[in-house]
Image (cartoon, grey):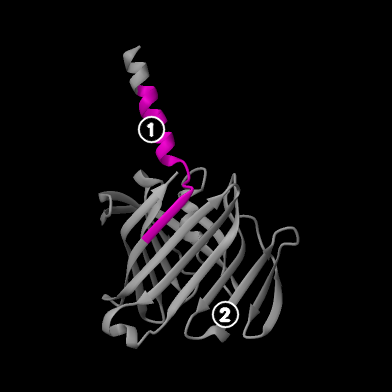
């Protein structure tokens, strides 16, 4: 009986740990081609079946003169049995307010309405499971189970692209929770010069993304998680 109770307690603890969070405050160090550029602060708040996810990136120190202002991404939508379902995405720069880009996802019509620099247009073909540029990083925390491979559409502020990720052992990484085993998901390039995206998640902490790498136009940008507050 005692062994059964202990097993039940372990399973209960694992279930609680794996439950999707209600609130998160995360800080990542931001690197550009290996040099520390600044930091990224991400916040997630869930209210019932609605969520708001905001990411703000800013340069620090001497490099702030080269990259002034902040870049703010915002994703709003619903939390479903299949994970996050974004309904509105925006990409804004404080030093260039005229470059605000938004995408409104209409799931009933399978369309996306975009606005950018005073222009407005719509795109057909929105597929089930699509994520936006920001929510795709946190969707791992809300999936019913981690897939071996991952195929989805990703919505940015101006277009819609197909992403195919392959999963593999990501090795052990330093995190705010100590050294953790990770799972790595890497985008499979379908064409030369296509943006490369790699995400490392920590299964022991609800598949929290602890490192992100983006390579595009010979520039490598990385985010390393340095502080985290996650509550259920």
| Residue 156 placement (x, y as % from top left) | 56, 71
Q: Is residue 7 above or below residue 141?
A: above
Is residue 22 highlighted in magenta?
yes
Residue that badge 2 annotates: 100
Which residue is found at the position 50% from the left and 54% from the top? Answer: 45
Residue for point 32% across, 17% down = 3
Nearest the viewer among 81 and 20 is: 20
Quarter of the picture containing the C terminus is top left
Q: Is residue 33 above or below residue 146?
A: below
Q: Is residue 215 magenta?
A: no
> Looking at the image, can residue 2 be seen?
yes
User: Crowdedness of circle 1 by 10 Å Cα count: few (<14), some, many (20+)?
Assistant: few
Q: CA distance from mark 2 to mark 1?
A: 43 Å
Q: Nearer the viewer, residue 22 or 188?
A: 22
Q: Nearer the viewer, residue 24 or 124?
A: 24
> Looking at the image, can residue 158 be seen?
no
Which circle's residue, 2 or 1, is located before the other in the chain?
1
Quarter location, residue 27: bottom left
Q: Position of residue 209 (x, y in %)?
A: 39, 56
Q: Give the magenta part as a residue range.
A: 7-26
Q: Position of residue 59 (x, y in %)?
A: 34, 78
Which residue sits furthest bottom? 66
Within 10 angstroms of label 2, few (less than 14), some, or many (20 or more) residues? some
Q: Can you say whether 144 is above or below 37 in the image?
A: above
Position above or below: 95 against 133: below
For image coordinates 41% across by 73% down, the residue present is 57
| Residue sitting at x 54%, y 84% | 97
Is residue 117 found left or right of 57 in the rendered image? right
Secondary structure under badge 2?
loop
Judged by its main secondary structure, the magenta piece is: helix
Q: Secondary structure at mark 1?
A: helix
Q: Which mark is residue 13?
A: 1
């Amino acid at each position: 009986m005692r062994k059964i109770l202990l097993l039940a307690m372990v399973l209960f603890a694992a279930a609680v740990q794996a439950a999707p969070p209600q609130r998160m405050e995360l800080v990542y160090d931001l690197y550009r081609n290996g040099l520390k550029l600044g930091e990224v602060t991400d916040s997630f708040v869930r209210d019932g079946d609605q969520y708001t996810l905001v990411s703000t990136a800013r340069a620090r120190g001497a490099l702030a003169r080269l990259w002034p202002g902040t870049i703010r991404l915002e994703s709003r939508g619903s939390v479903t049995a299949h994970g996050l379902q974004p309904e509105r995405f925006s990409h804004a720069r404080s030093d260039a307010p005229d470059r605000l880009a938004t995408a409104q996802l209409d799931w009933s019509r399978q369309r996306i309405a975009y606005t950018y620099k005073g222009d407005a247009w719509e795109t057909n073909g929105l597929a089930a499971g699509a994520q936006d540029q920001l929510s795709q990083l946190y969707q791992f925390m809300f999936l019913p189970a981690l897939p071996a491979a991952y195929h989805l559409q990703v919505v940015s502020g101006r277009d819609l692209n197909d992403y195919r990720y392959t999963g593999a052992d990501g090795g052990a990484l330093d995190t705010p929770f100590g050294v953790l085993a990770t799972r790595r998901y890497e985008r499979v390039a379908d064409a030369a010069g296509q943006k490369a995206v790699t995400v490392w998640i920590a299964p022991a902490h609800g598949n929290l993304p602890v490192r992100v790498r983006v390579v595009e136009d010979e520039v490598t940008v990385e985010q390393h998680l340095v502080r985290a507050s996650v509550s259920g």
